[in-house]
Amino acid sequence: MRALVLALLIACTRGTPTPPPGSADALAAYLRTVAGTDEAARRHAVTGWILDEAAWNRIVVPPYQALWHDYAARFDSMMPALVTRLADHGAITTRRHYAGDPRLTNAQVRVRWALPVQYPSMVAELAGAPIDTVFVWDGSGWRVLAGLDDLLVARVRALDPACADLVVRAGPKNPCTEVGWYVADTALRDDRKGFAHACQLATNACGNDKP
């Protein structure tokens, strides 16, 4: 009997195992410490979600690396929406960020283009609705690729506004998605010939598709 009681006491003191750093469970546990807290606490947390340049260059694929300065410059303007979104006390769920996930937002699909294949980025939902950003673990904490989608679309729009209108249609299970990646890649590489071809393909693939 004593042995049984001792075993139960040990099991209780151990509690729930700590999830591995960078895992979906770890992100969920972290976001539960942020969501629903007071505004100052949420603002403090979100302030720390910016990727530094070294981590950015380590994580995103080469065509997107040149966007870090714009990302950093815009980060403060992206914070209020995240701070407000995290005011809810609802349930947090998290999962790996896969391009084929039908529950992704259009922006989350396009951010997937900036990451290596199978890179363990994460997405989260709060109270059953997406937190519309993508989370990455940089080795020491959670960061977000907030605003990256807007920067990409702006780069395409500067070259061809009509083509940018097609790229913003890219999303889950959408015919614009695959060719949208090609448009984005050629725009960021400043490959004008490839970009013109990609935009023509986009017109054929999704020109008649409704946003």
Image (cartoon, rainbow, N blue to C red):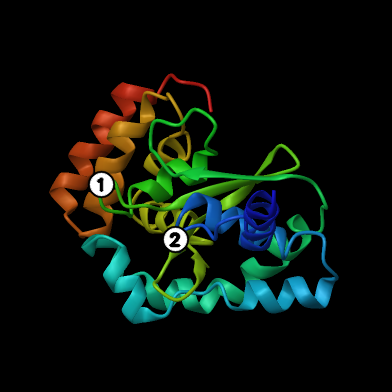
The residue that appears at 36% across and 33% down in the rendered structure is 177
**Secondary element at image label 1:** loop
**The quadrant where residue 61 appears:** bottom left
Q: Which corner quadrant of the image does residue 42 belong to?
A: bottom right
Residue 40 is tagged as none
**x and y, in percent, of residue 103 in the image:** 54, 31
SS of the residue at dot 2? loop
Q: Is residue 189 above or below residue 25?
A: below
User: What is the residue that sits farthest to the right in this orientation?
Assistant: 38
Tell me: residue 179, above or below residue 22.
above
Counting other residues with Cα less than 10 Å from the Cα at mark 2, is it few (<14), some (14-19), or many (20 or more)? Answer: some
Residue type pointed to by label 1: Val
State the residue at coordinates (46%, 54%).
23
Q: What residue is disc 1 on?
A: 117
What crowding class fits label 1: few (fewer than 14 Cα within 10 Å), some (14-19), or many (20 or more)?
few
Where is 52 relative to 5, above or below? below
Task: Residue type at mark 2: give it.
Answer: Gly
Q: Residue at x 32, y 23 (%)?
A: 205
Which residue position is annotated with label 2? 22
In-image side of 159 versus 62 (left or right): right
